[in-house]
Amino acid sequence: MARVPQENDGIAWERRQGDSYRVSEEEIAAFHRDGYVHLQGVLAEDEIAQLEREFMAFLRREIRVEGRDFCDMSADYSKPVESFSIINIMLPSKYNPSLKGNIYQRRAASISQQLLGDGMVFDYDQLLAKPPNKPDAEFKWHQDLAYWPVTKDTRTASFWLAIDDSTIQNGCLQFVPGTHLEHQLRDHGPAHGDREKSHTLFATLAPADAPKAMEIRRGDVTVHHERLLHGSSGNLSSDSWRRAWVIAFRSKETVEEERRIGFTHSHNDKLEVLNSVGREGDSNRDASGISGSGQDSNPRPS
C-alpha cells in the first residue's frame, strides 16, 4: 500500500522530547478553529511497534475482556465475533494494567495540556480495528459528547493514534470542520434499535456539512474536540488493516463526575446510566433518554 504523504517527514523526532511532544502555535490555533489537529510522528517506530504487539494480543483474544467491551461498532451485540467489521475493545488498560502510563499516554498528557490548559487527566482508552475487505465497517457520524455526560467543564482532547497508515481506501477518519462551534449537540439516535441492543449512536449530516477525510501515517495522531462531528467509511482495501488506539483526556472535574454517576466508558455500564448521558436539553428525547434523529447518513470521503 502506498504511504500517506507527510510534510516534514523525518523531523518529527525533534518534537518528541522524552514524555513530551511540542505542539506549534499554528497547530493549537487549528485545533480551536477547526475542532481537530493532525500531529505527525507523535510516536517513533520502536514505540509504536511495542504498542502494536499489545494491540494484537487483544485481537487474538489472549487478554480477557468482559462482556460488551469486546464488540462490533458496526452492528448490534448479536453479531458473531468471527464476522466483526469494526472490532471495538473498550478500556484496554483496565484489562491489561501494564498499559497504564505508557509512552503514548504520557505524550498525550503533554499535548492535552498545551491544547486545553491545566486540569486535564486521563479518562479512558479504546482500540478500534477494521479488517481488510470490510465495506460495511462504517462508523456512523457522531459527536463524542453525545455518548458522554455533559458537565460544566467538558474540555476534552480525544486522541486517535494510527497503528497502520490510515487512508480513504481503508476507512480513515473524516471530520466536519467547525461543527464543534455549534451551540447544541446534533440529534443522535440509536443505530440498531436501542442502547440495550447496540452502543452505537448516529447523527445526520446537514446539507452544508463538508466532511474532510484525514489520511495520516502510522505513528501520527489526530486530536479532536468533544463536539466535533466525525465518522468513517468501510475498509475497501484487500490487504490493509485500519487499526487505531484512542485515548481521551478530559477535565478532572468531569472525570470525577463521570465516576460519581457510575459512568466508566464501559459498554457494560448500567443501561440507565448510558441512557442519561449526552443531555443538553431534553425537548427532543424519547422515553429511552436518547435524542431523536433524522434519516441515517453514512460517512463518505470528501
Image (spheres, rainbow, N blue to C red):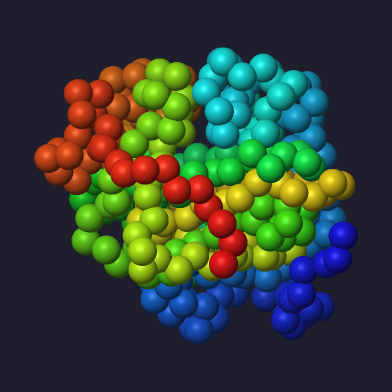
- Compare residues 98 and 137 and report the one nearer the observer: 137
Q: Quadrant of residue 264?
A: top left
Q: Is residue 201 left or right of residue 166?
A: left
The residue depicted at 78 percent of the width and 78 percent of the height is 9
Coordinates of residue 187 in the picture (x, y in percent): 28, 45
* x 61%, y 19%: residue: 79
Which of these two is toward me, 224 or 114? 224
Judge whether 123 appears above or below 38 on screen: above
- Residue 105, can we see it? no
The residue positioned 69% from the left and 42% from the top of the image is 135
Spot occupied by residue 204 in the image (x, y as percentages of width and height): 37, 50
In the rendering, at what x and y percent does residue 230 appear?
47, 55
x then y, percent, for residue 214: 61, 65
Give the left or right position of residue 129, taking residue 154 as reference.
Answer: right
- The quarter of the rendered structure image containing the N terminus is bottom right
Q: In this view, does 199 lie above or below 2?
A: above
Residue 125 visible: yes
Location of the C terminus (image quadrant): bottom right
Which quadrant of the view contains residue 40?
bottom right
31 is higher (above) or lower (below) than 103: below
Count of labels in the image: 0
Residue at figure coordinates x 67%, y 75% from the top left? 15
